[in-house]
Image: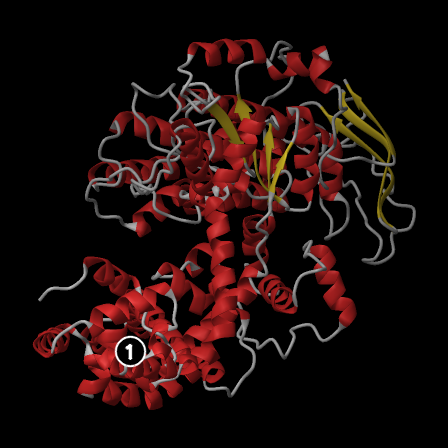
């Protein structure tokens, strides 16, 4: 059909009026094209009206068919039926619906993660703890420190960290019932264990419960630096400051976890209520979208895909059902978040402090270490300013790092939390791997974590990219398959003690022999009879040696061929035990003077390593030990003989303390002075008094001792060999001998007769110089 191009262009540029009255006015003007009122309009409308009015009936019919074919009736009715205000409101609502649909599409992946997270929470079986179960059910408002650590360790570390921290010994005491009812005792514990006085009630009760248990003080000494310890570093430069800030990223993630827990606590109730509202409203929305008119209307007015919206609402419907079904898990997550907020309040997140010099850092570190507030100190070994500037100029200008290619630093921690570096192996070897958290894995007490964070921070500073992979894990060096017998290990360590204890009975018996002979005065009697003291000693020595040799021979066979010490040389082992036995004899001789006991220990050895110590850095050896035993034996014999001479006991005459320096002692010991050949040999007493004077002034009864002389011959012409004049002896308050005068003649046998207590033995003691007397004179011709 022919249509004026200018009118057609103006018609396409003309907007359809929002007011229905204007649309009706257009239709009326078209009805009356030739009237003057229709032409009294603006130029655009006049051109369009003239174009329509000039159409014939056939052209109008063709135009109507063309319009009906291409016009959107629904939009036309929508624009004509609804008012302008209603159209604006519907438009806003449709835009909101579009935004909500896009948000739903964004949230759906998080909903899937939430469902997976809830299944994981359910798998943790946190409700197994009775206190946590009661708190989730609302039956309790608090939970004990132990239950808190048990729950969080399961949630964060899968298998828990209680064995590492020693928290498993915490008492099960709710927070509402404090352990210390006495405020004075509570303050004393806070002062004693350096507990922060500004701690939250939860943290304070947890600390007090911990230190009040067996081993809890040790766990607190380790846990306090981990939770609140300061990390010092030097030098304090922009580069090192940036490194330490990046190293603190892991701790900040824990702080973010606390923030997320607080947000969850605040929004959990809103989520549950929103799920309840959606449960009621989502079916209505789904039914409305199921209407074809509404579906077509939305698709016409907006670009929203109603099918996709239905799928989104269906997913949200499933989400609301899932939330309703797992409402108890939501409560567990809320309770777990509350526990996380409580426990995170015990952690100090801002703990890095920089210092300009190492001396200043050391001074601060010493003060913090006294309070157990030092986690670690880090000392960066950076080049000086000139070298650093020269290297920075030599580098590529695109590099954003001012660090040298190789960065060295030192981490200093308390000696209880790191391994010893002055040795590479244990002094005493035992067959086992090193996976003990209490003894060998001390680097896990904070050192490895800090080192890993600093290394990642340095790499990030050098490369400009954050390092997330690979994950760093610590594993002990592989140890071959073995069978560990703890009983044999214990026996191996206590074998020297067992060897000593096995011969304690010999020591007791040897000492008893000497002490028993001294108590019975057998030694003195033998000396009276002319027996050399050395003969008496060698008799005891040989008797004891026979016992020891039999035992040593049997013990050597058992140790060598019984599989206990199969690699040791049998003869060397025999000599060692003999040396040990000699030491026992000498020490028994010494101890017999003090009525005491002795002990010593021993080990097996080879000839080739007799002068090599099995301990690294030790100068002592088995060979030197044997020499020391020999020297000890000689010293024990000498000291024992000296004490016996100076302190002979109740029935002997003590020698002067300097008797070893007297020539007469050595002359008599070596028999340098020979006795006179005159007179008989082997006689106990020589000569008897010729006269018979009264021995005691008062000889009446048994209570007074009597020693008289009876002779039928006249001995006045015989030569006197020994003469006693004025002999007196008092035992306590009892007078045994008083003013005794006795002469012994050469060539005659003298016997002393008298009742018990008459003084016979006392007189013989005087003769052999075995006792002290108050006063007497002994004349020997």
In the displayed structure, would residue 560 be above or below residue 498? above
Question: Residue 128 location, x and y as percent?
Answer: 37, 78
Residue 127 visible in the picture: no
Question: Residue 549 location, x and y as percent?
Answer: 35, 35
Question: Residue 282 location, x and y as percent?
Answer: 30, 86
Residue at the disc numbered 1: 316
Which one is nearer the viewer's eye here, 96 or 535? Answer: 96
Quadrant placement of the N terminus:
bottom left
Colour option used = secondary structure
In the displayed structure, would residue 181 be above or below residue 510? below
Which one is nearer the viewer's eye here, 474 or 751? Answer: 474
Q: Would you say 87 lies left or right of 478 here? A: right
Quadrant placement of the C terminus:
top right
Q: Would you say 102 lies left or right of 737 here? A: left
Residue at image position (62%, 9%) is: 672
Which one is nearer the viewer's eye here, 545 or 43? Answer: 43
Question: Residue 401 location, x and y as percent?
Answer: 45, 24
Element under label 1?
helix
Q: Would you say 481 lies left or right of 625 here? A: left
Residue at image position (58%, 63%) is: 210
Residue at image position (57%, 77%) is: 174
């Amino acid at each position: 059909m022919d249509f004026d191009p200018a009118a057609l262009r103006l018609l396409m540029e003309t907007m359809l009026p929002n007011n229905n009255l204007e649309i009706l006015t257009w239709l009326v003007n078209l009805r009356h094209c030739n009237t003057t009122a229709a032409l009294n309009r603006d130029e655009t409308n006049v051109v369009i009206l003239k174009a329509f009015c000039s159409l014939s009936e056939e052209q109008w019919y063709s135009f109507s068919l063309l319009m009906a074919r291409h016009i959107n009736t629904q939009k036309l009715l929508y624009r004509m039926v609804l008012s302008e205000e209603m159209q604006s409101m519907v438009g806003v609502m449709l835009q909101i619906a579009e935004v909500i649909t896009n948000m739903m599409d964004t949230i759906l992946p998080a909903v899937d993660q939430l469902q997976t997270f809830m299944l994981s929470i359910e798998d943790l079986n946190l409700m197994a703890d009775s206190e946590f179960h009661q708190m989730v059910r609302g039956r309790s408002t608090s939970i004990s420190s132990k239950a808190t650590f048990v729950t969080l360790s399961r949630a964060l570390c899968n298998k828990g960290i209680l064995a590492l921290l020693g928290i498993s010994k915490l008492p099960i005491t709710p927070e509402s019932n404090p352990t210390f009812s006495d405020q004075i005792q509570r303050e004393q514990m806070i002062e004693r264990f350096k507990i922060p006085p500004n701690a939250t009630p939860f943290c304070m009760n947890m600390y007090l419960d911990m230190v009040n248990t067996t081993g809890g003080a040790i766990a607190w000494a380790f846990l306090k630096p981990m939770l609140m310890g300061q990390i010092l570093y030097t030098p304090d430069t922009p580069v090192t400051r940036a490194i330490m800030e990046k190293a603190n990223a892991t701790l900040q993630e824990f702080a973010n976890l606390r923030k997320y827990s607080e947000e969850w606590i605040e929004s959990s109730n809103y989520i549950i209520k929103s799920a309840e509202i959606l449960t009621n409203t989502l079916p209505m929305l789904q039914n409305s979208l199921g209407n074809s008119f509404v579906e077509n209307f939305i698709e016409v007015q907006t670009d929203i895909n109603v099918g996709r919206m239905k799928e989104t609402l269906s997913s949200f419907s499933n989400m609301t059902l899932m939330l309703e079904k797992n409402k108890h898990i939501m409560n567990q997550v809320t309770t777990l978040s509350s526990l996380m907020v409580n426990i995170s309040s015990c952690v100090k997140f801002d703990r890095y402090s920089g210092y300009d010099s190492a001396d200043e850092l050391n001074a601060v570190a010493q003060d913090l270490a006294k309070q157990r507030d030092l986690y670690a100190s880090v000392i960066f070994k950076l080049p000086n300013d000139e070298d650093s500037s020269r290297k920075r100029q030599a580098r590529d200008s695109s590099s954003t790092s001012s660090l040298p290619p190789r960065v060295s630093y030192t981490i200093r921690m308390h000696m209880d939390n790191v391994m010893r570096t002055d040795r590479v192996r244990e002094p005493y070897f035992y067959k086992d791997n090193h996976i003990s958290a209490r003894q060998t894995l001390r680097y896990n007490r904070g050192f490895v974590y800090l080192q890993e964070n600093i290394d990642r921070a340095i790499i990030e500073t050098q490369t400009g990219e954050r390092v997330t992979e690979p994950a760093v894990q610590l594993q002990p060096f592989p140890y071959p398959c073995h069978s560990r017998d703890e009983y044999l290990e214990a026996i191996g360590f206590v074998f020297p003690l067992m060897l000593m204890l096995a011969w304690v009975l010999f020591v007791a018996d040897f000492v008893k022999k000497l002490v028993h002979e001294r108590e019975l005065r057998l030694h003195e009697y033998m000396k009276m009879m002319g027996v050399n003291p050395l003969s008496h000693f060698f008799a005891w020595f040989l008797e004891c040696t026979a016992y020891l040799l039999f035992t040593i021979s049997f013990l050597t066979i058992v140790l060598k061929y019984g599989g206990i010490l199969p690699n040791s040389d049998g003869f060397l082992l025999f000599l060692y035990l003999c040396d040990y036995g000699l030491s026992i004899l000498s020490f028994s001789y010494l101890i017999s003077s003090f009525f005491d006991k002795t002990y010593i220990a021993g080990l097996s050895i080879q000839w080739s390593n007799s002068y090599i110590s099995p301990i690294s850095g030790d100068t002592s050896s088995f060979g030197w030990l044997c020499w020391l035993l020999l020297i000890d034996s000689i010293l024990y014999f000498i000291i024992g003989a000296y004490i016996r001479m100076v302190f002979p006991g109740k029935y002997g005459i003590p020698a002067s303390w300097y008797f070893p320096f007297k020539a007469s002692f050595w002359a008599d010991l070596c028999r340098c002075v020979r006795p006179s050949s005159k007179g008989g040999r082997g006689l106990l007493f020589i000569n008897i008094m010729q006269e018979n004077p009264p021995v005691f002034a008062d000889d009446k009864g048994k209570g007074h001792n009597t020693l008289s002389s009876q002779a039928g011959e006249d001995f006045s012409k015989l030569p006197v060999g020994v003469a006693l004049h004025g002999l007196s002896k008092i035992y306590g308050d009892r007078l045994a001998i008083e003013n005794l005068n006795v002469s012994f003649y050469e060539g005659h046998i003298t016997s002393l007769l008298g009742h018990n207590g008459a003084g016979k033995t006392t007189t013989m003691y005087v003769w052999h110089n075995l006792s002290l007397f108050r006063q007497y004179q002994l004349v020997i011709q």
